[in-house]
Amino acid sequence: MISLTGLRERVDDDIDPPSVLVISDRHVGSEVVTALDRGTDACLVTDRDGVAGQTPDDTRVVVGDERECAVLRDAGAQTTDIALVSMQTDRGAFLVTQLLRTQFDVETVVVVLNDPQHRPAFESVGSEVVCGSQILATELERTVETTLQTHETA
């Protein structure tokens, strides 16, 4: 499993400046592209105006159906170094992943999964997997522990 910190380190170390394509119909996409935008050639692909509107003005955004080859081509999928896919459904993420791998020959595709049971399907097509539920559980646990420690010392 690769973390977002690991993704940043990989992107920063490999190519200068690396091209990162973030494909998402969720607000996590705008958050990630905003965080990566410094020092990268980052582009967000989304079909949601609300997601597109959450990025800084200087961030490149392509609004359109993430599952269409023409939209991915307009975003530069054919020359991207790494793609991050985070969709509301794992089925949609799998379709986008397949397009990136087969139509655009994107070597590194990182997918944020909703259901950890889908991990084998994504790994079978050579994707790196970040499990959203595991990340959320870890963050919630950290927050609860911090809150309990704060109450104990008060």
Image: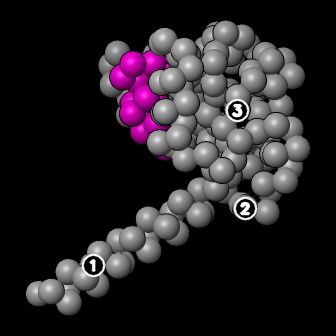
Residue where numbered disc 3 is placed:
109
151 to the left or right of 14: left
Residue 71, quarter of picture: top right
Secondary element type, mark 1? helix
Amino acid type of disc 3? Val
Circle 1: is it few (<14), some (14-19), or many (20+) Cα within 10 Å?
few
Sequence-first tag of 1 and 2: 2
Q: Position of residue 113 (x, y in %)?
A: 68, 52
How far apart, in angstroms, are the residues tagged by discs 1 and 2?
Answer: 28 Å
- The answer to whether residue 61 of the structure is visible from this angle is no
In the rendered image, the residue lying farthest to the left is 154
Q: Nearer the viewer, residue 86 or 110?
A: 110
Secondary element type, mark 3? strand
Residue where numbered disc 2 is placed:
116
Please say whether residue 106 is one of the residues in the magenta stretch.
Answer: no
Residue where numbered disc 1 is placed:
147
What residue lies at 64% left-to-right and 15% top-to-bottom? 80
Q: Position of residue 78 (x, y in %)?
A: 72, 11
Placement of 145 over or under 64, stated as above or below:
below
Sequence-first tag of 1 and 3: 3
How far apart, in angstroms, are the residues tagged by discs 1 and 3?
Answer: 36 Å
Q: Nearer the viewer, residue 47 or 87?
A: 87
Please say whether residue 37 is one of the residues in the magenta stretch.
Answer: yes
Secondary element type, mark 2? helix
Residue 48, quarter of picture: top right
Placement of 2 over or under 98, stated as above or below:
below
Q: Nearer the viewer, residue 139 or 17?
A: 17
How far apart, in angstroms, are the residues tagged by discs 2 and 3?
Answer: 17 Å
What residue lies at 86% left-to-right and 38% top-to-bottom? 125
Q: Which residues are magenta?
A: 28-43
